[in-house]
Structure formats: structure tokens, C-alpha cells
Image (cartoon, rainbow, N blue to C red):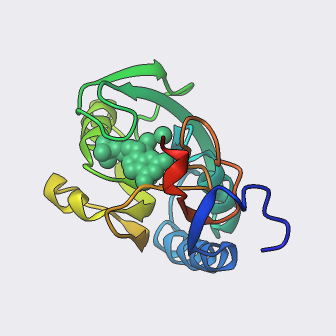
Amino acid sequence: MSTDKYADEIESVLIDADVIRDRIAEMGAMIGERYRDSEQEVVLVAVLKGAAIFVSDFARALSIPSELEFMAVSSYGSSTSSSGVVRILKDLDRDIADRDVIIVEDIIDSGLTLSWLMRNLRTRNPRSLEIVTLLRKPDAVKADLDILEIGFDIPNEFVVGYGLDFSERYRDLPYIGRLHPRMYS
Ligand code: XMP
Ligand code: MG
């Protein structure tokens, strides 16, 4: 990767940009097919900030029209793990009652944040509510979440890029990579 602006800081690439692109194209076709007969546009609810990059590619890969909504939540806990106690920093702009809603996530780790979000959005009576995530870590199985589609299952290690950050850096990387250990200290 000759134009890699963070080359010195990334230890290795976990998922290449073209692999991500191909998988999202696949997901867009498959999920579009599922919602083909929806009466109204599907509402994509992206969770800021991590899912911003993924949702912009996913919405364009989706073979049916969609509306974009964003939510920002903060979960109490450390920066790299969540506690399941969540506060809404930015709520949806619109009502989702009777709409087909897909929560779009960058990564599911413990799944605690998402469990909370599912419960919260369900109280707003959407017609349907599903989850699509680009990445899933092994611990996510404990959360017992029904996930419509997973881009990639990854090992239990910290990754950055394609929306994922470490202290707000690396979201703009086109691939998913492992940070060089010296960057943590
Ligand atoms: P849960 O509630 O599923 O939290 O434990 C998922 C959130 O944790 C963050 N997270 C990561 N962020 N690289 C990141 O940049 C990672 O490897 C990683 N693992 C978890 C992320 O904010 C996600 O939304
Ligand atoms: Mg983060």
C-alpha cells in the first residue's frame, strides 16, 4: 500500500480495502433482496461515529432505496470496552413507527451497547428491526443478538480503520488493520 498515510503506525492489515468493498457489495445485494417488497424506504440507523464510513458504502451498495439516520450514544466504560449503560447523545431525527429499520454497526464486541439500542428502538414500534454489522468479535456470541448480516468475524484483538478509531485517529484508513503496539503507550 504505497499511499498509506499511517504506514508507520499500523502493524499489519487484517482486511484489505478491496475485500471490504467486495463483501459490502455482496451484503448490499443480499439485504436489498430481502427488503425488495418493502412499502417504504428502509431506514438505516448508523451508530456514530464508527459506522459512518461503513454506512456510506453500505447504503450505496444496497440495491433498494434507503433513508439515513444517525444516532450517537455514549456507553459508560473504558474507551475500548463498554458497560452496557448507555446515554443518547444524538437521537434519531424522525419517527420510525411502522418502518423497516436496520441498525448499522461498525463492530460488535460485547454487544452490550447494541442490546440496549435494540431495546430502545423497539419501544418506538418499528415494523421490523434488524442489525447489520461490518465486524464481529468472539465475545459477541454471549450477547445473544439476532444479527441479520455480519461482514467479517474477526479475532479478539483491537483493530482500527474504516471508521474505527484509536483516540479518534485512523477512521480514515481504507482498510482494517492492527495498530502497532507502541502506539498504545
Ligand atoms: P460493545 O458494546 O459491543 O461495544 O462491546 C462495541 C463498541 O466498542 C468499540 N470497539 C472497538 N473500537 N476497535 C475499535 O476501534 C476495536 O477493535 C473495537 N472493539 C470494540 C467500538 O466503539 C464499538 O462500537
Ligand atoms: Mg470507538
Going 38% across and 70% down the picture, which residue do you hit?
Answer: 154
Q: Position of residue 52 (x, y in %)?
A: 62, 45
Going 60% across and 50% down the picture, which residue do you hit?
Answer: 163
Going 77% across and 74% down the picture, which residue do you hit?
Answer: 1
Q: In this image, 78 relative to 100: left or right?
A: left
In depth, the one of 144 and 154 nearer the eye is 154
Residue 184 appears in the picture as rendered: yes
In depth, the one of 5 and 66 nearer the eye is 5
Outermost residue, right side: 3
Q: Position of residue 46 (x, y in %)?
A: 53, 43
> Total number of numbered labels?
0
Q: Position of residue 14 (x, y in %)?
A: 53, 72
Residue 104 appears in the picture as rendered: no
Q: Is residue 46 above or below residue 158?
A: above
Quadrant assignment, res 68: top right
Going 57% across and 70% down the picture, which residue do you hit?
Answer: 12
Q: Is residue 98 above or below residue 85?
A: below
